Amino acid sequence: MNELKPLGVYIHIPFCRSKCQYCDFYSIGGSRDRRLVDNYLQALTVHFKEAGALATDYIVDTVYFGGGTPSFFGADSLRRIFAELQHRFRVDKEAEITFEANPDSVTESLLKKLRAEGFNRISLGVQSDRDDVLQKLGRPHNYEQACAAVKLARKVGYENISLDLMYGLPNQTAPQWEETLRHVLELQPEHLSCYGLKVEEGTPLWEYKDAANLPSDEVQAEMYLNAVSILEEAGYRQYEISNFAKPGYESRHNLKYWLGDEYIGFGPAAASDFAGKRYTYIADIQNYVRGVLKQDVPILSECDAIPPRERAGEYVMLRLRTTQGISPEEYEKNYLMPFAPLLEAILPLEKRDLFCQTEDGRWVLTPKGFLVSNQIIGLLQEAQEQSEPLAKKR
């Protein structure tokens, strides 16, 4: 029998209490339409059956319920989805099972039901410790509720809690951001994600961004570097541009994205990288449900087989988001492309303290390098495009 290959599963729950001012993810704000919920659950059930038949030589070692707000969807619906997933896929007994939650929708009953079902990791969207800022962002909770949600999760038995925070918020100063970090560290989470606020076109925040008094790029850079320093001092290892964890608590699911491992997504706007192809479903729940159940409308918005050169570019792009960085040996062995053109671009950046080389020869971005990672990755990909594949050995 062949060894089973690891697989991550992402399940999009596109329902939430309300849309935040900055959110550009596909979600539906407002009350849950019971008929739509039932139809969506049915569509996921059918989709699991179809996809599971194609994954018989895989074992699911991470499951991630994202959104939207999965906790707003309710424990019974989430349990039903997970039970069906277990019925159609082989799920590892030691799998990491994560669900996202907003503090306002966390109850002891929800936490107990999901914990009993096997959910073992919770990601809470805290964002800030300042209630006035949370209100401006359109967040449906206050900081007291966030603290209460963490304490409740501990009480129920969750030993892997991740908190999301944002910096670069309206009227926020660097000292205020440091104060937020220190307050949140008192909650002793195992994992922290710290994201800079992005103002995306099409969101309510975009319409009044010029009057929002957002911190300058220079101040945001200061906030980021301060976070790296404060969290390192507190025992959190940075393992990706925006993610920090106590030893052993890195997000196993999200690492699949950054390390180029296989994952399969379900739901509107969900993406997959599975069996050599990358594909994304349409960002429309009605047509997703209809396409899965009736098969009379296409549910894919894109689907591509990824050629080796493009995979090589992704290796550079994704691995440089992590503190594992890139390895000349891995690169040349796996993609049959020369590393020398990349090294030529890297060495001047090393002199500017944007790159460093580890003891085992890997090239990793420094915290300063992470701040300009998009530009650096672009430079390396340009060098890559101009290089020729290594001659195949006879």
Image (spheres, rainbow, N blue to C red):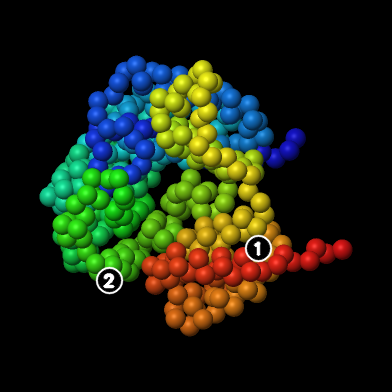
Is 259 situated left or right of 234 in this image? right
| Numbered mark located on residue 218 in the image | 2
Q: Quadrant of the N terminus?
A: top right
In this view of the protein, can residue 79 be seen by the observer? no
- In front of the other: label 2 or label 1? 2
Q: Position of residue 9 (x, y in %)?
A: 51, 37
Camera-side residue: 73 or 149?
73
In this view of the protein, can residue 290 be seen by the observer? yes
Q: Quadrant of the C terminus?
A: bottom right
Is 92 situated left or right of 144 in this image? right
Tags 2 and 1 touching, CB below 8 Å: no
Amino acid identity at mark 2: Glu
- Which residue is at 43% across, 51% downward? 249
- Which residue is at 73% across, 38% downward? 2
Residue 161's place in the image compared with 175, above or below, is above
Q: Residue furthest bottom?
A: 351
Q: Residue furthest left?
A: 132
Q: Position of residue 361 (x, y in %)?
A: 60, 72
Q: Residues within 10 Å of mark 2 (few under 14, many from 20)?
A: few
Amino acid identity at mark 1: Glu
| Numbered mark located on residue 330 in the image | 1
Residue 140's place in the image compared with 236, above or below, is above
Helix, strand or loop status at disc 1:
helix
Q: Residues within 10 Å of mark 1 (few under 14, many from 20)?
A: few
Residue 326's place in the image compared with 262, above or below, is below
- Which residue is at 50% across, 75% downward? 356
Q: Position of residue 287 (x, y in %)?
A: 44, 26
Using the numbered discs, state the Cα–Cα distance from disc 2 to disc 1 in whole angstroms: 35 Å
2 or 1: tag closer to the N-terminus: 2
